[in-house]
Amino acid sequence: MSGCPVENCYAPDATCALGNLLLKNCPNWGGQEKLSAQPSPQNGDEIVLPWSGSALGKSDVAFITGRKSPLTVGILGAENAGKTSLLAAWYLLIGRGAKISSRHTFSGSFTLSGWEAVARSMQWRPGVQPEFPPHTSTRGTREKGLLHLSFKEDSNLLRDYLFADAPGLWFQRWAINEEAPDAQGARWVVQNADVFILTADCAALAGTERGSARSAIQLLARRLSANLHGRPVVLAWTKSDIAIADTMRQAVLDAVSSQIPDFIEISVSMQTPVGQDTGVGVGLTDLLRQLLETRRLKATLPASRAKKDDPLFLFGARS
């Protein structure tokens, strides 16, 4: 057994459901480390906090929602479209103190270890050149990883955000067959996200397989449209420093707009344009700011025929 046998616990890919920093200290752990017959005594290896800093699983969402329901961001796209790189870039920009929004101030995260794991490959280390993060794992036992950020608005209101780091292969399979057994993670993201980023990989759209890349975006947009239910969508042109043909760009726009008429279009790149020493790439802060400004759809209450002011009679009144 390579994972935890407890339902709704996704160790070692996500934090232990009981909050154990070291899995050997968990009495339920039956993975690669030997399962202890008795609970471990209290020592410095254990933690008393309900989080470990790693990426969150479904069982951890309840802890985050204790303050207020977070806004969940679903990043959809094919493999190698730059989804994980977006997350890593945002984390590094926030860590450098980059100005994301005049209305929002970074106020913490319960998944700093998870963010570090995502961004580690893009950081300068002795003797190691920075590079883009590796592909997100698609092995069968892996659950979606949820990364948390908290921001304070100018009204001193705290808002929590969850970013789903899911592999592109999940969404490719989901786009082909919505009920595919190996697309369960993609279904969870689509069902629970409040806002979506649909990535269009400029490198793929300019390469030898550009036709397949365009078709994949069209297929994904069609499937997302059927499950959208009014939630906002941002079309992000990733790796936008790579030029694509105008006809290809228009074909992608036509394919998306035919399925999702109301979407926002933002071009992003990790490369700073020549002559600009900003060090923040292109569109990265704009895209994150757009997410921070997003608001969850409000429920619409049915019209009432009641003429009384008493709220107890506002629904189900008979004429």
Image (tube, rainbow, N blue to C red):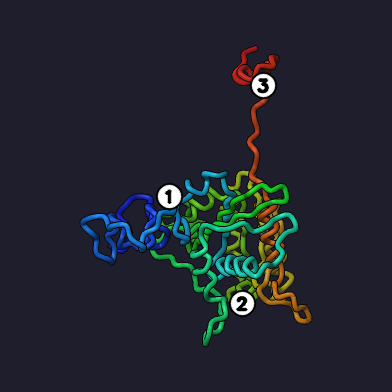
Quarter of the figure with the N terminus: bottom left
Give the image location of residue 260, x and y in percent: 66, 52
Residue 249, compared with residue 9, is above or below; it is below
Give the image location of residue 27, x and y in percent: 27, 55
Instruction: Give the labeled residue for mark 3.
Output: 304
How many C-alpha atoms fall within 10 Å of the one at disc 3: few (<14), some, or many (≥20)?
A: few
**Residue at x 73%, y 54% (from the top left corner):** 103
Of all residues, the one furthest to the left in this rendering is 37
Instruction: Give the labeled residue for mark 1.
Output: 59
How many C-alpha atoms fall within 10 Å of the one at disc 1: few (<14), some, or many (≥20)?
A: some
Q: Quadrant of residue 125?
A: bottom right
**Mark 3 / mark 1, whichever is N-terminal:** 1
**Residue at x 47%, y 46% (from the top left corner):** 62
Q: Distance between the Cα atoms at labels 2 and 1?
A: 41 Å
Q: Is residue 50 left or right of residue 197?
A: left
Instruction: Give the labeled residue for mark 2.
Output: 207
Residue 28 versus residue 237: which sits nearer the camera? 28
